[in-house]
Amino acid sequence: MMYSQEILQSLSSNECALKRFLTSKLGCSDTASDILQIIAEKLLKMKTNRNVENPTAYLYRSAHNEVINYFRTEQVRAQYEKAYMTVCIDSQIPDISKCHIGSCELRCLNLALDELPLLTRQIFFMYTIKGVKQRDIATQLAISLSNVEKRLTVAINFCKEVLSR
């Protein structure tokens, strides 16, 4: 079964008027063209044998319905986009007060680390900042693994003490 030839002919003859109608509703001729394309595709895919009394009115009603669908879709999309942006912004931008507290703690920690003996400080930086394994630190500095572990424990406890003040 094919769709009524009258509607397809009416679409062809009223294309410019339908586009103007859609543009006035949407405010954008490109979007109007897209919706007109959607209407044409739906008409071509639709299969029925019934006749429509007024094909032009049918097309305008279809256009009106597609405008409603478009605005509903845009409204939902805008809500999802807003929710997504809220989540992204909240997760990517740190709280200013937390940044300030963190920078103060970091400054205090840096000053405190200067009080540690040079070898202990060096072991602490190699392990925490550079990610060197304790066994490799011992090899590089030509000291025992036990000495590295003890100095690292001293440095970590010292840092905890400084941060708890």
Image: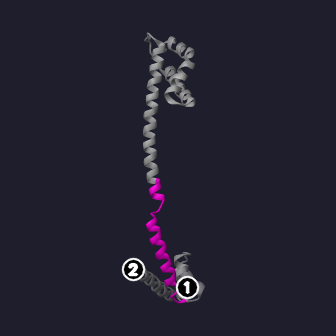
* Residue 1 shows in the view: no
Q: Position of residue 60 (x, y in %)?
A: 47, 19
User: Label 2 sits on what residue type?
Assistant: Ser
Magenta segment includes 39? no
Q: Earlier in the sequence, mark 2 or mark 1?
A: 1
Q: Is residue 131 above or below residue 79?
A: below
Mark 1 surroundings within 10 Å by alpha-carbon count, few (fewer than 14), some (14 through 19), many (20 or more): some
User: Label 1 sits on what residue type?
Assistant: Ala
* Residue 17 shows in the view: yes
Give the magenta range.
88-117
Residue at 50% from the left image edge and 22% from the top image edge: 45
Q: Position of residue 35 (x, y in %)?
A: 52, 27
**Which residue lies under the disc numbered 1?**
138
Observer-nearest residue: 23 or 150? 23
Magenta segment includes 105? yes
Q: Position of residue 136 (x, y in %)?
A: 56, 81
